[in-house]
Image (cartoon, helix red, strand yellow):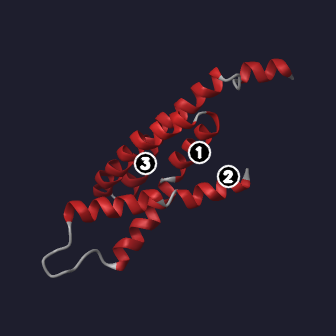
Amino acid sequence: MLGNIISSIVFSLWLPVAVLVVSLARFGIDGEGMGPSPIDILMLFVFTWPAAFPLTLAVRLIHNRSRIVAYICAALLGVGAVYGVIVGGLLGPFGVVGYALVASVPAWIVLGILAAFRGGGARRQASQA
């Protein structure tokens, strides 16, 4: 379990990297060859890296049950999370975290549905005890 959490923390780097790439592609570098400062990039990583953890963990847990569903969730919710975080950045750090958490909710719902269909629901486990 601890290894899964540690690897999820490392895998959650996808969100700050994707936000940086999309932001550079969308807004570009100004005419003087200046891009975002190192402080800007550091602040981007400080707020978006932890915000990516709930979605990353949910997709990894879904992957243990159904790989195709995990890939679909990662693709759809990942794109939504990237653009949501970019828009949420206009509201500050709370907007970044808020949009990332909202993007992870459907993945957790899918995980609950998969658990219920695969016999991992609470009722079955309670009856087996």
Which amino acid lies under the numbered mark 1 shown in the image of this protein? Arg
Q: Are marks 1 and 2 in contact (CB under 8 Å)?
A: yes
Locate residue 111: give its quadrant.
top right
Relative to 124, 34 lies left or right:
left
Earlier sequence position, callout 3 versus callout 1: 1
Nearest to viewer (mark 3 / mark 1): 1
User: How far is the residue under mark 2 from the one under mark 3?
Assistant: 20 Å
Instruction: Tell me the residue at 71%/26% (across/down).
Output: 120
Which amino acid lies under the numbered mark 2 shown in the image of this protein? Asn
Relative to 53, 36 lies left or right:
left
Q: Residue 60 carries which label?
A: 1
Q: Residue furthest right?
A: 129
- Residue toward you, 51 or 115: 115
Locate residue 58: give its quadrant.
top right
Residue 91, horizontal then vertical, whole percent: 31, 55
- Which residue position holds label 2? 4
Which amino acid lies under the numbered mark 3 shown in the image of this protein? Ala
- Residue toward you, 82 or 118: 118
Q: Is mark 1 on a helix, strand or loop?
A: helix
- Which residue position holds label 3? 100
Q: Is residue 121 above or below residue 97?
A: above
Earlier sequence position, callout 2 versus callout 3: 2
- Residue toward you, 14 or 91: 14
Q: What element carries label 3?
A: helix
Q: Which residue lies furthest to the bottom in this view?
A: 32
Earlier sequence position, callout 1 versus callout 2: 2
